[in-house]
Image (tube, helix red, strand yellow):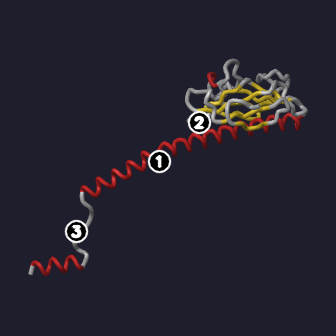
Amino acid sequence: MEAVRSSVAKRAGLGQCGMTLVELMTTVAVAAVLVGVGLPSFTALQQRQSVQRQMEALEDAFRLARTEATLRGQGVTLCARDDSLGDETHQCAQTGQRWSGWLVFVDGEERGQVDEGDRLLLVQQPLKGDPQVRGTVRSITFGRNGLAMSAASRFGFFHGEQPEAHDTLLCVNKLGRLRRSQGLRCG
């Protein structure tokens, strides 16, 4: 009788359900290997996307500054934001090459600094977790004709503390035109 019940249960699908410990351990091991192989390339993908986001934000700020200078018929400056003063104080950085955030403002005196009568057009706070940006200049002022009033400059985007290992450069020529470049040179 027991044999009949056992064979009926097997035919009806009422037998053993689930998996053994060995099967579970094998599945977990395969999943761990797949995650170990895929995670580094996922991290690299995230870093490339964050470089892209940061670069596009800075390009947009350049375009805004240049366009506003020609529309308003007066100087507009894009400068590295001094983040040591806090989020509420908007001043240009006086030292260093790091652009952790930036300001775009109508620069009445064309000095490259936010003065009493200057109007802020854009305040870009530092983007958390994104790459660092280093520039060869701390500010660029566009004159009423849309031309940059400073020398040609470049901005490197990188992760960690290796500024010589730029993922991409953003190059700005004397005319104020932007161009992307791979490597360490704009030329």
Q: For mark 3, give the secondary structure.
A: loop
Q: How far apart are marks 1 and 2 (CA)?
A: 21 Å
In this view, the mark in front (2 or 3) = 3
Amino acid of disc 1: Gly
At 82% from the left and 33% from the top, the residue drawn is: 176
- Image x and y of residue 111, in percent: 81, 21
Q: Name the residue under label 3.
A: 16
Circle 2: is it few (<14), some (14-19), or many (20+) Cα within 10 Å? many
**Residue at (76, 24) in percent of width and height:** 114
Name the residue located 69 percent from the left edge and 22 percent from the top edge: 93
- Res. 38 mark: 1
In the rendered structure, are the residues bearing label 2 and label 3 in contact, judged by CB atoms less than 8 Å apart?
no
| Residue 16 % position (x, y) | 22, 68
Three-letter amino acid code at the position of disc 3: Gln
- Residue 78 falls in image quadrant: top right
Whole-number angstrom distance, CA of label 2 to CA of label 3: 51 Å
Residue 136: image location, x then y, percent: 72, 24
